[in-house]
Amino acid sequence: MLMKTEDIQAMQRRIGVKDDGVWGPVSMAACRGHLRKLMPAINPWPKSDRSSLIAFYGQPGDESQLVSFTFPYPMFYGGKRVLTSRCHRKVKDSLLRILAVIGDRWGDRPEIMEEAEDYGGIYNFRNSRGGSSLSMHAWGIAIDLDADDNGLNTPWPLRADMPLEIMEAFSREGWLSAGAFWTHKTVPNNGYDAMHFQATQ
Ligand SMILES: [Zn+2]
């Protein structure tokens, strides 16, 4: 569901700018600042270039680095319940803390859990969508949520509906929220790939 003007206004109050319902450069910059401020002073994750990733996480596609875990709240993949998944061993505890916080704090807010419960995948040995470099999913260090409403090229927050509260939970563990930090190529003051969260700086 698209964010309504009052959703944008609520987000503007959350990030501390004038709540006029118009998402411009001031809102986007404040949003990034707000999320960065929540991040640990020393970010535990590596930079996202290939050599930093390999030094920290090992080779992409190395399934011996993956561990299984159980989701802390009900997850659904294409409408079907999923109980467990796999991720890189180094991000497991952090990811479980993030999901537990989302479930504990926002479990009674359907408009947030709607996105948080819609699982889109973690480990997948493939190139990034529309790109030639390997996706962070090839290391099992990224998770996608609500891919239908937060697609790769869907501008956030103009059309993609990932709640800021979910991005905040990832920021507190130092993860990067693509929707807020990756600049949309054609829509000003918007991000893209808002489904995607990764354990890199
Ligand atoms: Zn992704």
Image (cartoon, helix red, strand yellow):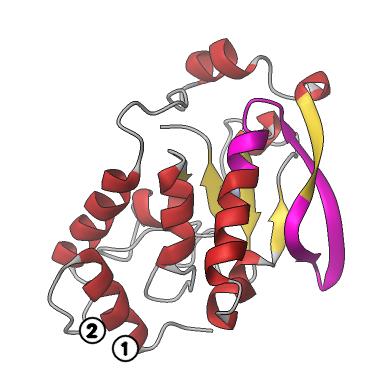
Tell me the tag on residue 140. none
Whole-percent x and y of residue 3? Answer: 42, 82
Q: What element carries label 1?
A: helix
Magenta: main secondary structure equals: strand
| Label 2 neighbour load within 10 Å: few <14, some 14-19, many 20+ | some
Chain part drawn in magenta: 71-95
Dot 2 falls on a residue whose secondary structure is: loop
Name the residue tied to disc 1. Answer: 5
> Quadrant location of the C terminus?
top left
Which residue is drawn at the image coordinates 71% and 26% (left, top)? Answer: 89
In the figure, residue 108 lies in which quadrant? Answer: bottom right
Question: Does residue 191 sit above or below 16 in this rendering?
Answer: above
Judging by the rendered image, the residue that carries numbered circle 2 is 21
In this view, the residue in front, 89 or 190, is: 89
Q: Does the residue labelled 1 lie within 8 Å of ligand 1?
A: no
Give the number of callouts.
Answer: 2
Q: Which amino acid does label 2 sit on?
A: Gly
Left or right: residue 127 versus residue 200 is right
Residue at left offset 86%, top offset 66%: 81
